[in-house]
Amino acid sequence: MQPLNLQTLIDQTFESISNKLDAVQPTLDVRETGFVISVSTGVARVSGLPGAGFEELLIFPGNLFGIAFNIDDNDIGVVLLGSYYHLKAGDEVTRTGRVMDVAVGDELLGRIINPLGAALDGRLTPATAQRMPIERSAPEIMDRAPVTVPLQTGIKVIDALVPIGRGQRELILGDRQTGKTSIAIDTILNQHDQDVICVYCAINQRASAVAKVIATLRENQALDYTIVMVTEGSDAAGLAYIAPYAATSIAEYFMHKGRDVLIVYDDLTHHARAYRELSLLLRRPPGREAFPGDIFYIHSRLLERATHLNQACGNGSLTAMPIIQTEAQNLAAYIPTNLISITDGQIYLSPDLFELGILPAVDVGKSVSRVGNKAQHKAYRAVTSNLKLAYAQFEELETFARFGTKLDDDSRRVIDHGKRIRACLKQQEQQLVSLTAQIMILLALMEAVFDTIPEAAMDSAQLAICQASDRIPADIQSRLINANTLNDSDRKSILKIAIQTLAQFEKIA
């Protein structure tokens, strides 16, 4: 037996010791940690994270998340996403190496969640297999298609005079308590048979107002195709800031699957104020009305994500309906002018009309759709061509008539016809009107069939027209939706049914 070489014996010994150490020692978990320097309302200053990047997600004690907003030389300004009252100076902070994201998937339909994806409806948190960053680049120009398909709201004054297309960004603005949210909710309710998924994002709303909206959606079976994202007034400003971006990422998930999606931001006034609060606390330079200089950018990068994708990208669409509150009818304020310049049109709700009981209180003169009749059913063009002009003439003559001005017969006829237009455009909340019924009402209005109906009987007459629209032959109803124009034969058939229906009301005069 040959003796072992000394060097070989040493190598074998070291190898045996090394194997035993590997079996005993755990794998090292290398993490970059820092500590809290100070905590104020909704924000914190953190030190000791030299590798942290802009908008990186950080974890605080108590599973509290924060977003790195200010990357300074010596510390980091962090926006906190939740209750922060347990934080104190010296607490440990850990990097995650990722940006803020949100769970997306079909499992979210019918659910009520917060921007972090936690359930608020008393059920388990939705189990989704996919997550998407809340901040995403808007689709490129070459990936977009023209806006041509209408998004029916069921509201006559909007569908006829301020049409909205799928992929459009239509702003709703007006003073408080003028019916802004009601228009958005009615639009969601009208999508029950339109194959449109809806996302309602409540930003810093009162809990009672959110509960009312959810109850309305549930009563009308609209929650089945709707996702509700909620941040209440008592929530942290950071949650209000990320809410619309998280909701948009959820909507984009369905858009990229080829679906049509409607998203409502209620409202971006609270979003702008939350961002101003965070910016001032982080010592960012204030500008006009104390808003930071990038207040326009935070809304433009949000709303630019709404679009209609081309066939190669799935042909999906994302329609945005942001809501903004004005003060004392001032459309020239900072945030309203920003949003007006970003969006593709606006629906302005006048408090004066609201006080007169003209609901919805849409000011036709100040409302506009920059897509226009390109995203409107062709049948509307044949029955609304002179409607806006006739209504404008009526409003002007009505102003003169208030001063006791003596009017000729033609002017009286214009005023009488204008009163019928106003009565036809009035509509109660949640009393949605189908496309065929709208066409029938507008056609009868244009042909002056309503002019012989007393004003007191206009509501009953419209209700009768809506019920009579079911008698329109199915082939004509199909052509109203798909045909390029309203042909003379169909026009006469619809008008005949309208005249027969309204004949009973003429006898009252």
Image (tube, rainbow, N blue to C red):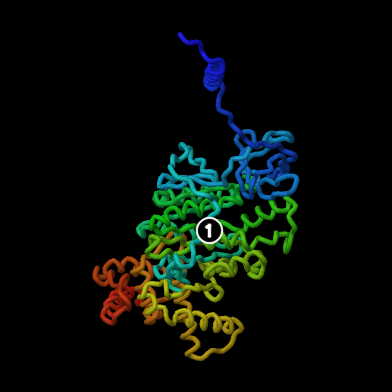
**Residue 234 visible in the displayed image:** no
Q: Amino acid at mark 1?
A: Ser
Q: Position of residue 365 (x, y in %)?
A: 54, 76
Q: Is residue 194 above or below residue 204?
A: below
Residue at 68% x, 34% y is: 92
Quadrant for residue 374, please give it: bottom left
Report the front residue among 130 and 239: 130
**Residue 319 visible in the displayed image:** yes
Q: Is residue 289 above or below residue 63?
A: below
In the displayed structure image, the side of residue 17 where residue 433 appears, left or right: left
**Mark 1: few/some/many CA within 10 Å (<14, 14-19, 20+):** few
Image quadrant in which the N terminus is located: top left
Report the front residue among 129 and 465: 129
Q: Extreme front residue here?
A: 2
Image quadrant in which the C terminus is located: bottom left
Q: Position of residue 298 (x, y in %)?
A: 61, 59
Report the front residue among 309 and 391: 309
Residue at 69% x, 45% y is: 43
Residue at 59% x, 58% y is: 268
Q: Secondary structure at mark 1?
A: loop
Q: Position of residue 211 (x, y in %)?
A: 52, 47
Q: Extreme top residue here?
A: 1
Residue at 62% x, 38% y is: 59
Q: Which residue in the protein does label 1 denote? A: 137
Q: Is residue 62 above or below residue 225?
A: above
